[in-house]
Structures are given as structure tokens and as C-alpha cells.
Amino acid sequence: MKTPPSRTLFLSGMDVKLYPDPESASIAAAMLIEQVIVDARAKRGKAVLGLATGSTPRRVYAHLVARHRAGELSFRDVSTYNLDEYYPIAANDPLSYHTYMYDNLFKFIDLAPERAHLLDGTISEGLAGAHAGLFERSIEADGGLDAQLLGIGRNGHIGFNEPSDLTPEAAIKLGTRLVELHPTTRSDAAAEFGSVERVIPRALTLGIATILSARSIIMLATGPHKAEAVAGALLGPATAQLPASLLSYAAARTTWLIDHAAARGLE
Ligand code: GLP
């Protein structure tokens, strides 16, 4: 059921909508995505979505699946591109983002398999750069992303674009590439992998430049553990130390959907 935001803020040039709980924030995200599909279909005859993984978007996908099951939403003319994937990892590994997307969304909807694009965790290291470039060119050839759904890491990462010492000007030019995971990211993934030592320490990620080029960006953040990163990104300066703060470079196209727990630091 749809809940209107309990508060709307405008921070660092971005629309920020606060919701009482993760469920209502997730429904809002699903509704925005559905609207993007409807609008893009009307304008261009297709929609191109950038999708995220992690625990946060699970509810969003559950709502999109429910809309599909109700006969209200088709993905026949939709293409999807995922933000990231561990490296190296086989697509059929239970911990891969390929498996996550299949289990949470793809197996339930009418998206054609050839339209669901993920970075390939099995590519040889020597070809990773070429593979990343090809992924970006596929997005461009598809007309660019109509929407990019994002979550935020506790350290402010987006995709697997981790905190760095780059200048903001250099960080916003980062392309799709192979990266090392930050210690915070590894420790947050420890439960899933069984221990921090078992977490695959590298990943392929869409670059910040590609994320920022999406025609709309939907950032969903829920839970008290995200409050510090959310406050830093929305109240602080744009810095590569907190990659989500760089979304202010696409401020007019970015919407933050946050539950009260994650918004705690904004008061
Ligand atoms: C993960 C993913 C990100 C995700 C973030 C938050 O490691 N690579 O794309 O947005 O970290 O994850 P969660 O939603 O589980 O908190």
C-alpha cells in the first residue's frame, strides 16, 4: 500500500523523501521505477533500468514482482544493467549478484534473458577492462539508463565505488572497472560469506560517471546503520571520501528515499 512521504526535504539540491519505515520507502521506490518504465515506454518504446543488489532493494523487487503478478506491469520492453558483481565469481555461485537478481526478480517476471545484463565475474583479468568498456557501450547503445536504482554502503559507497582520495572532479569521471573492496564493505559482507576472510575482495562496478549519467537516480537508504553515511552525503561537501555525496553532481535528477531510521542524522 502506498504511503506518502512523511516529510520532504531539499538538501544539496536533491529531493529527499522521508518514510516511516523500510516498507513504505521501498514501495515508493518501486512506484518510481514503474513510472519510469511507463514514461520511457511512451517516449522511446522501451525502458532501460540500472539495478542494484544488497539487502535494501529486496523489498523493491518484491513489489515489482507483485505488480507484474497482478497483471499491472510488464518488463517485455525493458532492458536491465546491474551495478556490480564480485570478482572472480561464477554466475551460478549462490553468492553472485547474477544469482541474487535471478532469485529476487528475473525468475518472476517477463524480462527476456538477453535483455538482463550483468558484469561477468568470470572474465579473465586481462580482459576485465575491455569487458567493462563493452558494458558501458552496451548501455549507451541501448540509449542510456532511464533510471539507476542505488543503495548506499555504510562507508558511503555506491555500487562498489569505494571511498578514495581522488578529487571530486576525478572521481565523477571514474568508469566501469575492477576494484578492491574497502574493509568496511568486506566486514559488512562477512555474514553472507561466512567470515570476513571468505569475502571475495574484488569486484567489477559501474563507474561513478555512468551512474551520474542516468536520466534519473533513485537512492534508497533504510536502517539506523545507514544514518551516518546518509547525513554525510546530504549535509556535507561532495567528496570522493563519501562517494554518495557525489550524487550532488546530478542533483536535479536524483531522489533520495529514506526511512526515519536512516534519516536520524538529518535532524
Ligand atoms: C553492497 C553493494 C551495493 C549496495 C550496498 C549496500 O555491497 N555492492 O550496490 O548498495 O553494498 O548494501 P545493503 O543494501 O545490503 O546495505
Image (cartoon, rainbow, N blue to C red):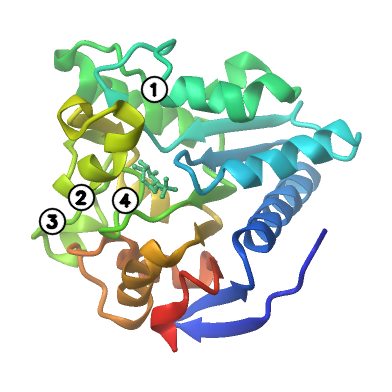
In the picture, measured across the screen, residue 191 lies left or right of residue 179, that is right
Q: Which mark is residue 266?
A: none
Which numbered disc flags the more N-terminal residue, 2 or 1? 1
Q: Position of residue 163 (x, y in %)?
A: 18, 56
State the residue at coordinates (29%, 45%).
188
* Image quadrant in which the C terminus is located: bottom left
Identity of the residue furthest to the left in this view: 165
Please indicate whether residue 206 sits to the left or right of residue 52 in the image. left
C-alpha span from label 4 to label 1: 24 Å
Q: Nearer the viewer's eye, disc 2 or disc 3?
A: 2
Query: The disc labelled 4 sits on which kind of residue?
Result: Ile
Q: Is the C-beta of the residue carrying label 3 under 8 Å from the nearest atom of ligand 1? A: no
Residue at image point 49% right, 20% down: 99
The residue shown at (38%, 24%) is 119
Task: Name the residue tied to disc 2.
Answer: 184
Q: Earlier in the sequence, mark 2 or mark 4?
A: 2
Residue annotated with mark 1: 95
Q: Which mark is residue 208?
A: 4
Task: Please state which of the two labelled residues, at mark 4 or mark 1, is closer to the viewer.
Answer: 1
Distance CA(mark 3)–CA(mark 1): 26 Å
Identified at 60% across, 30% down, the residue is: 104
Q: Would you call the spot at circle 1 few (<14 residues within 10 Å), some (14-19), or many (20 or more)? A: some
Question: Which residue is denoted by mark 3 in the rendering?
Answer: 164
Residue 30 against residue 201 in the figure, above or below: below
| Callout 3 amino acid | Ser
Which badge, 2 or 3, comes first in the chain's sequence? 3
